[in-house]
Amino acid sequence: MKKLLLSLVCFVFFVGIAVSQITNPHLNDFNDGTTQGWSNGPTSPNPPTNVNNFLEEVSAGGTGAGSKLAVFNVGTDITGDYTAAGILSIEFEAKTPTTDDLFLRVGIKGGSDDTEIVTTNFVTVPGSSDWNSYMLSLVAGDFLIDFGPNTEEEVLADVKEIRILHNPDPEFPAAAIAATLHLDNINISDTVLGVNENALSSLKLFPNPAKDYALVTAKDKIDNYKLYSVLGALIERAEVNAPSFEIDLRNRPTGIYLVELNAGNTKHIQKLIKK
């Protein structure tokens, strides 16, 4: 009887572990007034806080606890097997009221030996900026190993911690800086095409793939567009103020791009292939 009870306990325990991992998509919107598991350690003199339903992180610069700008999450709802869940990217909204530019990367710790990997690419949050949306790819080829013996693939199949950090260099530890970072709508999912579900009505982008030009048409007037690399780097921004326009691709290298179209409060992001 004791063996049976022990087996049942073990079964329930392991089932709990199996279901306690990231779902696709995973969104932290901070609308519940908490930090939703985002922290920077028990010794931090200024841990992140929820301010008006977004996350605020303050770093002091210099040396010692609280000097570096980073937030991390080890919750069972955001860790686990990113590969099996089909996770490919992270998108978030960010701004900073302080004057220095912030260079944000994603660091992940995981694998059998707690290997630390960090994205080779970063997004720049300009000093004294307002809210903007940023994207980073979370596939193995976009990381490098900063410490530990596991491969990037092994880490992504066993994520134990994810962090958003400031560092101009591709290093898992954050860099020291006196700054404030505001974060909202952290979305981890299987796409790099954004989280806004509102599409411009009757939107068409063709031809796709395109060689020289891609034509965008919509029923609504498009205010402006932004062209990103597939890794989230902003390449071009242009005002449109028309329901149709052309994107000039003649001097762009072949590859995958993201086109963000804005009309009032509506945003649509679509993949565009240059052949």
Image (cartoon, rainbow, N blue to C red):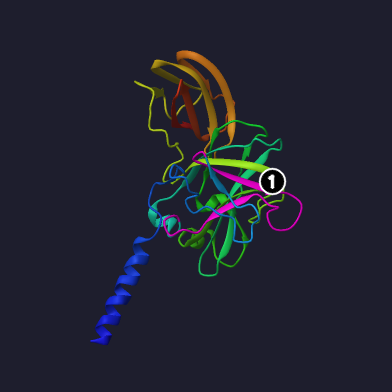
Does 1 appear above or below 268?
below
Q: Give the residue type that dot 1 points to.
A: Pro
Count of marks, rendered view = 1
Locate residue 221: give its quadrant: top left
- Which is nearer the eye, 36 or 20? 36
Quadrant (top left, top right, bottom left, bottom right) of the N terminus: bottom left
Does 143 appear above or below 158?
above
- The answer to whether residue 138 is seen in the rendering is yes
* Local SS, label 1: loop
Instruction: Give x and y (percent) for residue 2.
Output: 27, 86
- Which is nearer the eye, 275 or 53? 53
- The answer to whether residue 275 is seen in the rendering is no
Does 230 appear above or below 264?
below
Q: Residue at x 45, y 24 (%)?
A: 265
Q: Residue at x 34, y 71 (%)?
A: 13
Does 114 sit left or right of 127 as displayed? left
Instruction: Give x and y (percent) for residue 55.
Output: 54, 44
Does the magenta segment cover residue 245? no
Q: Residue at x 39, y 57 (%)?
A: 84
Residue pointed to by mark 1 = 168
Instruction: Give x and y (percent) for residue 77.
Output: 41, 56
Locate residue 248: give its quadrant: top right
Does 185 sit left or right of 236 as displayed? left
Give the residues drawn in magenta, as a range: 52-78
Does the magenta segment cover residue 77? yes
Instruction: Give x and y (percent) for residue 219.
Output: 37, 15
Locate residue 228: give its quadrant: top right
- Which is nearer the eye, 110 or 3? 3
